Image (tube, rainbow, N blue to C red):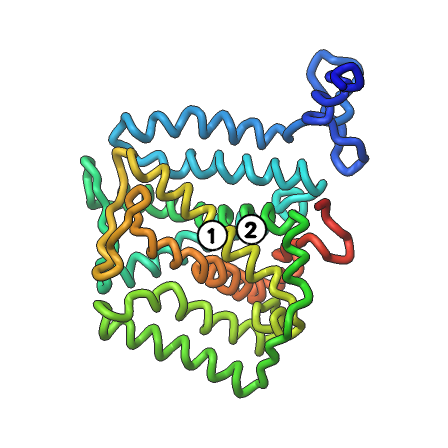
Amino acid sequence: MLSKLDVKASLEGLVIIRDDRLPLRRIPLREKPLQRYFLPYRGLLGLLLIAITWPLSQQISQNIFFPLWFGFILLIDGLVMRRTGTSLVVRSPKIMVVMFIVASPYWWAFEGINQITQNWVYVTTGDDGGIISVIEASLSYSVVIPAVFEVSELIGSFGFIKWFARLPALVLSRWQVILAGVFGVVSLVAMLIWPTYLFPMTWISLFFIFDAINNMAGRPSIISQIGKGDYRIVVAFALGALVCGFFWEMWNRDASVSWEYNIGFLDFARIFQMPLLGYLGYLPFGLETYAVFHFVAGLLGWSSDAHVPLSGDAQTLPA
């Protein structure tokens, strides 16, 4: 049996792609380019950034959240490119830039809500005030949207996502869509009035507001997708945010600049710093992130550039 095993071919299978989707890799001082590769340069750079910044986050008192997560984003983009031959960076660099810009005010909105709900508090030995702290925080928050989109696209490239392409449709009338948007506004206001009991609405209300607006404006929306019986976007972004949440909490656990949670009656069975049931909040957070960014992309007229290809699309991605 071992005699039939081509070890060289097996090892090559780990690093060589047998198609023409990826560009040639040209190496300095090498006359002939390498035909295929394990990861694009940005993926390797991402691995290097993670390897350097992860240990440093446990040792120094400065916030290095941005370089750590920038490395993560580069790594995931490289993995998506490795699997599909395309990625967010390749398709539309301007969309990636907009994601970083939009993510800061997006998360600052949650920080404003948290001033009322008091669900998390930051633990740091450094200066807690001043413009420098605001800039550092804004830079850290800027990775939220690109991270969620990158991981969601990676999940969407796997064959299992096609299982959710033909499910029973949930068709909403225009009035029902309007009611969904109204529900989002009412739930947000109610949560700010009664934060002790309604704080979970933090991760639901914005989705209903912005996805309803997107749907009525003819922009990409989850409401329109489930109206066709296609739940792939729902699954990809819910799981994408959950995966990001796992890494957020894992890297937060031993960091010198970190945060702690207080979610009342749900505060039990912690995994890292996050209580177990708290991870459920990441699922709708992924949908909120999709809806909010497509709202912004729609305002800019760039909705098509923000499209995330999924396994099962017309140009089928690999299983």
Q: Say whether residue 216 is left or right of residue 317.
A: left
Q: Residues within 10 Å of mark 1 (few under 14, many from 20)?
A: many
User: Label 2 crowding class (10 Å Cα cut-off): few <14, some 14-19, many 20+?
Assistant: many
Q: Nearer the viewer, residue 176 or 8?
A: 8
Residue type pointed to by label 2: Ser
Query: Which residue carries the number 1 mark?
Result: 241
The structure residue drawn at horizontal position 42% and vertical position 41%, both measured from the top left corner, is: 247
In the image shown, does 47 or 282 lie closer to the viewer? 282
Query: In which quarter of the view is residue 227 placed?
Result: bottom right
Q: Is disc 2 placed on a helix, strand or loop?
A: helix
* Residue located farthest toward the front when viewing the structure as drawn: 1
Circles 1 and 2: CB distance less than 8 Å?
Answer: yes
Q: Residue furthest bottom?
A: 175
What is the number of callouts on the image? Answer: 2
Q: Quadrant of residue 204?
A: bottom left
Side (left or right) of 313 relative to 113: right
**Where residue 216 sits in the image (x, y, percent)?**
57, 78
- Relative to 258, is 286 above or below? below
Q: Residue at x 61, y 56 (%)?
A: 306
Instruction: State left or right for residue 1 relative to residue 44.
Output: right
**Left/right of residue 191 with respect to residue 145 in the rendered view:** left
Q: Secondary structure at mark 1?
A: helix
Give coordinates of residue 273: x percent, y percent. Answer: 28, 44
Q: Quadrant of residue 234?
A: bottom right
x, y percent for residue 74: 54, 36
Identify the residue under disc 2.
152
How much space separates mark 1 and mark 2, taking CA atoms? 7 Å
Q: Position of residue 52 (x, y in %)?
A: 42, 24
Residue drawn where x is 40% and y is 38% of the image: 66
Amino acid type at image mark 1: Ala
